[in-house]
Amino acid sequence: MQQIKNLHEIETIINQNGEMVISKNNKNNVVVMSMEEYRDNIFDKETVYKLLKSEEDIEKGRTRKATDVVKEFREKFGF
């Protein structure tokens, strides 16, 4: 196991490996990752959630035809 002594070492390891798990008493307590990786991770989770929700909407019939929506928008907003 590698011991880290300063923030610069943490940044270097994260830049090389993408993330770092910090352990205390042989228990994984903290994951440190780059901001870019964190944003990608959050985006992926949100995307999966939205896709699952939309599949549920389709199964439960909570959908409308695109042509009806476009027609409604044209009437309401004039485009």
Image (cartoon, rainbow, N blue to C red):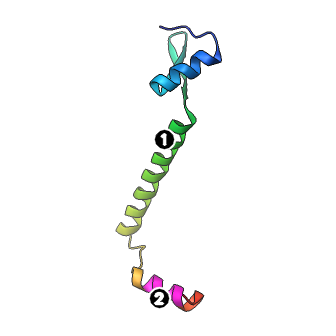
Could you tell me which residue is drawn at 58 percent across and 22 percent down?
11
Residue most toward the right? Answer: 6
For badge 2, the amino acid type reads Lys
Give the image location of residue 28, x and y in percent. 51, 19
Of the pair 51 and 9, the residue shown nearer to us: 9
Under circle 1, the secondary element is helix
The 10 Å Cα crowd at callout 2, few under 14, some 14 to 19, many 20 or more, is few
Q: In the rendering, at what x and y percent does residue 47 appear?
A: 45, 53
Mark 1 residue type: Asn
Image point (52%, 88%), residue name: 74
Report the residue marked by disc 1: 41
Which span of residues is magenta-colored? 68-74
Residue drawn 47% across and 46% down? 45
The residue at the point 50 percent across, 8 percent down is 2
Question: Considering depth in this image, is 60 or 40 the residue closer to the camera?
Answer: 40
Q: Is residue 7 magenta?
A: no
Which image quarter: residue 25? top right
Q: Give the quadrant of residue 5.
A: top right
Image-quadrant location for residue 65: bottom left
Going from the N terminus, do you reach mark 2 or mark 1 first? 1
User: Where is residue 73 shown, x and y percent of the image?
Assistant: 53, 85
On residue 71, which mark appears?
A: 2
Could you tell me which secondary element the residue under label 2 belongs to? helix
Q: How many marks?
A: 2
Q: Main secondary structure of the magenta part?
A: helix
Residue lying furthest left: 59
Establish if 29 lies above or below 52. Answer: above
Quarter of the picture holding the C terminus: bottom right
Q: Give the Cα distance between marks 2 and 1.
A: 37 Å
Disc 1: CA contacts within 10 A as few (<14), some (14-19) or many (>=20):
few
In the depicted structure, whether residue 66 falls above or below residue 39: below
Q: Is residue 77 above or below residue 56?
A: below
